Every structure is written in structure tokens, then in C-alpha cells.
Image: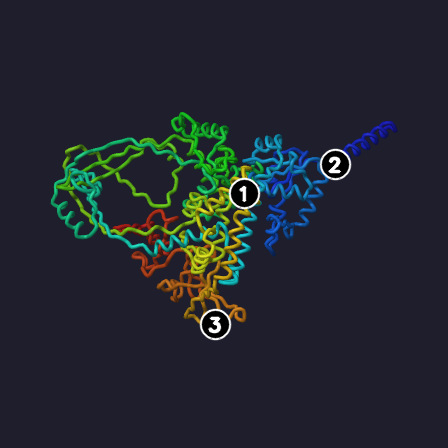
Amino acid sequence: MATKETKTTAAKKTSKAKTTAKKTSGKKKNLVIVESPAKAKTIKKYLGSGYSVTASMGHLRDLPKSQLGVDVENNFEPKYITIRGKGDLIASLKKEAKKSDKIYLATDPDREGEAISWHLAKLLEVDDTSACRVTFNEITESAVKEAMKQPRNIDLDLVDAQQARRVLDRIVGYQISPLLWKKVKKGLSAGRVQSVATKLIVDREREIEAFIPEEYWTIDAKLTNSAGKLPFVAKFYGTAEGKKMPLPDEETANSVASALKKAEYIVKAIKKSEKKRNPAPPFTTSTLQQEASRKLGFTARRTMMAAQQLYEGVDIKGKGSVGLITYMRTDSLRIATEAQTEARGYIARTFGKEFVPENPRFYRSKKSAQDAHEAIRPTSTAYNPEQIKDSLKPDLYKLYRLIWQRFLASQMESAVLDTVQADIAADKYLLRATGSTVKFAGFMTLYIEGKDEAEEKEGKIPPLEEGQPLKLKELTPDQHFTQPPPRYTEATLVKTMEEDGIGRPSTYAPTLTTITARGYVAREGKALYPTELGTIVTDLMAEHFKDIVDVDFTANMEEKLDTIEEGTNEWRKVIKDFYDPFEVILHKAEDEIGDVEIKDEVSDIPCDKCGRMMVYKQGRFGKFLACPGFPECRNTKSIAQELGVDCPECGAKVLVRKSQKGKTYYSCERQPECGFISWDEPTKDKCPQCGGVIYKKRPFRGRGPIRHVCGNKECGYVAEDTKKSVAKKAKG
């Protein structure tokens, strides 16, 4: 039983505890503001209880959408307003700010991030000359804690560079776009970068249309040793003296082939050499977008969305939220010494010491690169993609694996190849065979960079000796024609934009999204081609706004924006130097451009609601049919091409259709009554084993032959598209 004294003592302790708790709860904390909840979650894990971390959800202030928002008469003063729908969020941030001792602005480490912090400082009444800004290239515990120890003031040069870009793009877009609306079609737009990108695609299409193919021939000789074994292929090269000889036509090819059929073949010379192949550098924004397009089939937008998530943080089982890659908007190839050291250690432990070069690999960035950030790399090589696969969504896993492998490979030893070149004399002609074998795989063990164009594969050459006679087994003359330049893909367009200085890492993906969404550019597989609308608008821009679509002018403007960031130029002066001649050109264009009529292509399909002949329209996902009676009649139809094959289920026609993502599929014309639908193309052919329908199964990303597969899964018949089209049984 407790005494009176004991109860009194306990009551005092309880009272003291309540007072302490009250004081603790009322204690102010440090407030850290980032852009996104995912980033906030990851950073919060690394900071103690003395920090509150919240998200601004991107920009809170911007130029108004309803007007130009730039006072051109008052030294181009921007008119910033609160973005619609952000009022409650701003009120919440202000409330949190008042409760805090110190406010840290930890938005992304680039122009856009600096501008977001500057706007936040204005809204929250934070002195932008105080040490309120923290930046980190990677969201790891060490990087975040180190950044918090070294806060700085807001970099107003960076802010001014962003303001200049924003004002410049607003002037171009809001001054030219209404003119296009008036003269051509509502809903059109022009842009400082998007118009140049569209012109590149239009110009390439015209190159293709104007291209005149030229005939040429090749001759391949299949040769063996005297015993008729170890066959290999040698290609016709030229004269016996070693002078290269073209084969421009069939007559020349046949004449040479006739002589080669009668000739004796002798190994004239053997040249052996050792060739080193170096790894590709780690990723920049543009090379990541290019490689993700080549190897994963990702659009630039899809790539950047996944990269953003990997940078901000992903929940890893047993680890919590982890930032897996460094900042993903960069054109620098610089790598931190600590990251190199970690990578070299991982390579030695995993692959062996022979895979580690004597000295760390360094890669030189291009002159115009902004070296504030590193190249894109994993925050730690310890996070092996295969070990954390279960924690990652498919897109995140694929992209992270690509980044992880590319970075590690960039720090590995070169591959070593043994190459052989055999010159073979045949009468008065010379043939040449080349081959290579991998002596030491080096970085190729882990990763090989993708290519936009197919590389000619070298065959294997058996052991040969000079003076050795050879036997001709087969001679194959082949006709070829020179090919026009290929259409741009997203990968090659981004590459060209980077090489020409059009835009910056942050603008590649949005630009591609814009020109397709506006209907200026369409896709056919991976290839980009201009629509009629895109061509008309480009020609108008080229005639009346030459500088806006000029590659050199646009690149020069990007360089001027860089000089603002460097603090060597004043942003209002840059805008004025652009605007004064632009205003003259704009007024002239308003007077000179006549009304441009874009007639819709009329189809032979009547509208099933009002009877008018439907017209072709260009939409976000390609062409579709629409009733010309809009808005009275709003009927639309998807365009379906007939495959020329009967439906395997009901006998009706099979149609070729496009999914919303642009992927081709096949379905019955009687859908939804008939449920037939297939990603694989049905054919007229019947299975020789069971009589079932044969489908064409195309290889993943074009790698390997097309397979002809029986639709009857119990059968399992498969045949490959090869020269001999050899069939094989999968079962039985």
C-alpha cells in the first residue's frame, strides 16, 4: 500500500513529465522543402527529429496562362502569379515556416530547381542572400548530411538564366502561336526549341524524298581448304594489286564472277593484329535517353519519368526509401573519386583483378557541358539490380540495370580482340576475308553499347597460311542499292539536338512530347516523320521567322543563356537583343501571311450517324476518322487496315490496329461480337503438323529472325525465317 508521501512524489514526477513534453512539442524545428513527396520521404530518413521535410510539388509561381505575362515596355519584367490550385499548399507551407527556426530550400541542383527555391523564398519571406539553399547530386545519407552542413545563398545567376529562358520561350510561343491560330489552324503552337526539332524532321523527310538510289553489286565467295573443310566467306575487293574496284552494275559483276569461277584461289597475305576496344563513358541525359530507346524501347519521356523516381527514392525491402541514382539532368561525364574507388573494388571482387584497369578511367565532357553535376551513375554499386529487382517496378528495374551496368563497364578494363585479315588472290582479282575473336572480354562481359545502325558482322576465319591453295565452293553476286538517310528516331534526334546545341538536358524529353502531341510529328514504329500540318507550319516558320528555326541561331541563344548562368551577361539585355528585331519580323509576318487552308483528306467511309463522308484527322495516337459535321455530329472511328486474312475464329476479316501506345495488334472486324485479338500476326498458312493457323512472331526489338508459330499450343510447331527456312518441332 502506497504512503501519502509516495503518492505526492509520483504526482510531482507526472507533472514534471507533462511540462517537459509540452516544452518539447513547442520547440521549433528546421524546415526542409523539396519538390516531391518521394524526395521528402528519402531525405527525412537521413535527418534527425530536429528536421521537418515537406514538398512544394514543383513550381508554386509562374507566368499566367491567360496572357503574355511579360511587360515588354518595362524592361521585360515578368508578372508572376500563384499557380491555380496551389493556394492551400502555399498556406500550409507558410504555416510550417512560421513554426520553424530555420528554412532550407533543397530543390533540384539546376536552373529550374534554383528558380523554384527563389520563388519559395519570395513566398515564405526568406532572405535569398542568407544561407538557405542546399543542393546534393545524389540523395544518400552522406551527401544529404554534408549538404546540410554547407548551406549557401540562392544563386541569382542561375535564377536569371531560368528567367531568361522562361521569358524568351513565352515571348516566342505567345507571339507566334496566335498568328498560327489565326492564319492556319486553332491549337497550333511555335517554340524556340520545338520548331527547330520539327524542322530537323521535315528536312530529313525531304532528303529521303529527293534521294536517288544508285545500284551497286557485291560478290561473296565461299571457300574451303584443299580437303573441302572449314568453309569461310571472302568478299570481292578489287584488283590483284590491291586497288579497290567498284561493281556498279550487273554486267561488271557478271564479268568478274565469270573470271572468278575459273580462277585458282591462293592465300596471298595474312595480317594478324590485336585490337583494343574501350568501354563507353557513363550516361549523360542525352545518352541515357538514346540507349533506353535502343535497348528498352523507351520514349524520352518514359525514360525521364523512371529516372526521376530512381533519383528521388524507391522503397527497398529492409532499407526503406533509397535514392538509387545521381541527378539525371546532366551533360557532364565527371565521376566522383569515391564512386570510382567503390566501383573498382566491386569489379575486382566480382569479376577478378584482371578486369580492373591500372588507373581509374576519366572521361572528358564536351566544352559546353555544365560540370556542376556528375554523370548519371548508381549511388552505390552495392545495390545490384538483380538483388533489389523485387522492390522495383518493371520500368525502374530495366532503367536502373542499364545505368548500373553502363557505369560499372565504364570503369572496367578494355576488351582485347584478335583480328585476322586474309587477302586471297584469284586470277587478276583480290578477295578479302576478315574475322575477329575475343581474346579478353573485359567490359564486354557486362555491357556493350547499342548502335543506331546495324554493324556488319565479321565471320570466323580458319587457320590459314600464305601460299595455301583454297577451293571455291559457292560464288554469290548480289545486287544492292544505296539507301537514303534514315528517318530520325527519338534516339537519333536527341543525339542530333545535343550535337547541334539545341536545347539542354532538361528540354529534350518535353520537346519530343510537344511536337508529337501537337500533331506536327507522328511515329511509325520507332521512326519519326512529319505530318502535313508539321510541314506546313515549318515552311511558314522558315519563310517568316527564319531565325527561330535556324539551328545555329538557336544554339547561339543557348550559349547566351549559359553566359547568364556564368554571371558574364545580363538576362534583360539578352532578351532585348532578341526582342527588338523579333518584333519587327512579327509585325511584317502578320501583314504578309495569308490564310492557309488545310483541307482534310476525305475517306470513302460514310458516317454511320449522319451520312457525311468521314475525313482523316491527326490525333495524339495517329490518324483517325471523324465526321466533318463537327460539332453537330461528333462521330469518330479508328482507322483499321485489312490484313487480307480471315479471322481464325469466325471467318470475318482480320484488321490491323494500333494501341494507344502505338503498338500494332490484330483483331476481328466483328469485335466485340467476336473476341479474336492477337499481338502476333495471323497468316493464311496452315500448320503442316496439325492444320492450325500459323502466326508470325516477331523478335523482341528486332533481334533474331521472325518465327512462324502454330496457334495450337498443344502442337508446338515452329519455323524460322532463314534463307533455308528450316522447320523444327518444339514438342514431341
- Against 536, residue 36 (above or below) is above
Q: Amino acid at mark 1?
A: Gln
For disc 1, the marked residue is 309
The residue nearer to you, when weighing 276 against 353, is 276
Q: Farthest residue toward the bottom?
A: 611
**Residue 107 in the image, given as x and y percentages of width and height:** 59, 40
Mark 1 touches mark 3? (CB < 8 Å): no
Query: Where residue 608 is drawn, which disc sits there?
Result: 3
- Give SS at disc 1: helix
Q: Quadrant of the N terminus?
A: top right
Above or below: residue 243 compared with residue 533: above
Q: Residue at x 48, y 60 (%)?
A: 619
Q: CA distance from mark 1 to mark 3?
A: 46 Å
Q: Nearer the viewer, residue 595 or 148?
A: 595
Mark 1 or mark 3, earlier in chain: 1
Q: Which residue is mark 2?
A: 25
